Image (cartoon, helix red, strand yellow):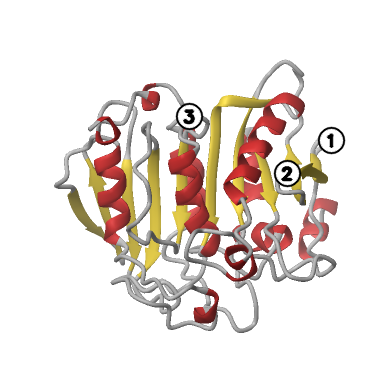
Amino acid sequence: MTLRYALWLMGVVFCSPGTLFGATGSIETQDGRTRTYTIDKPSVSDPKRLMPVIIMLHGGGGDDDTAKTMTGLSDAALPKGFMVVYPNGTGKFERIKKLKTWNAGHCCGYAMDSAVDDVGFIDMLIDQLISKEGADPARIFVTGMSNGAMLTHRVGARLCHKIAAIAPVVGGLFGDEKVPKCATSVLTINGALDYSVPLEGGLSQGRAASAWDGTPLKAASYQGAFWAKANGCDPVPDKSDQKDVSVTHYRCPKGIDVIRYVVAQGGHAWPGGRKGSSRGDTPTQTLDATQLIIQFFEEHPRGAARVPSPASAH
């Protein structure tokens, strides 16, 4: 038995020389809060070589550790040269690491109730990653799960001048979001068996329903329609059914893509990932969300996608 295999069996992460796991950072935001995050970085032989960045937003009630464990994002993205950043939301009890939420307008919990400026935090985080961590300004990507997916939509719309593409997983839109002023490529993933973020919209039927303000979600299909309109895409998409997965692809201007995935056996979990808690839904293995998202981000750097949004010009 090799040492690497033995370490894998014991659940120990094997790090290649020069790979940086779990470095922590903090930012003092304009609302007087100290916001924290964790960075995993690959080894880089040329310090002048800029790295693409994936910002991963944890689900409501989670934190940076749960986001990393549930998705396996660092293990998959670092070998491809990505830096992966896991910011933390906020909570009523600052000393408790978990139980963090994001302010996505109508959800969730403490962050929503306290009107926390999470978009401002991510904005400052992006600037810090570029100025201090060697992030490539043309390859800043954001993904997130559930409450984190809702914030992913929010930052994608408001920070479209900085973000190349987004990938919200088991999230949605409420219908009152402002139209972005520039185009952004979008990939969304939802589960047909998700009761926390229902595929057909409405109020959550999950354990965290009380964390919302009572505003119902739009159906998951609205995500595609919203971004297709914002990006100047054809409003009538192409649809195809693969093995237990439905794919909706909008025809968009060059350099832009809006793609929706619906997993027939998917619940409120990260497809292909791990459970976030003993009470959480078991992730379907029909689709590997992490690999799909990484490939989508690799194919959509900021460039042609920076044209003004036709919808916002009217």
Residue visible at 76% across and 49% down?
A: 32
Query: Sequence order check: which comes first, mark 1 or mark 3?
Result: 1
**Where is the N terminus found, in terms of image quarters?**
bottom right
Is residue 119 shown above or below 173?
Answer: above
Residue visible at 57% across and 64% down?
A: 112
Query: Does residue 292 show up?
Result: no
Name which residue type carries label 1: Pro
Query: Does residue 191 show up?
Result: yes
Label 2 neighbourhood size at 10 Å, few (<14), some (14-19), many (20+)? some
Q: Picture coordinates of residue 11 (x, y %)?
A: 78, 63
**Residue topped by disc 2:** 29
Number of numbered markers: 3
Circle nearer the viewer, 1 or 2: 2
Name which residue type carries label 3: His
**Residue topped by disc 3:** 161
The quadrant in which residue 313 appears is top left
- SS under mark 2: loop
Circle nearer the viewer, 2 or 3: 2
Cα distance in 3D space between marks 1 and 2: 34 Å
Query: Sequence order check: which comes first, mark 2 or mark 3?
Result: 2
Residue 146 horizontal side relative to residue 49, left or right: left
Label 1 neighbourhood size at 10 Å, few (<14), some (14-19), many (20+)? few
Query: Sequence order check: which comes first, mark 1 or mark 2?
Result: 1
Name which residue type carries label 2: Thr
Label 3 neighbourhood size at 10 Å, few (<14), some (14-19), many (20+)? many
Residue 283 horizontal side relative to residue 98, left or right: left
- SS under mark 1: loop
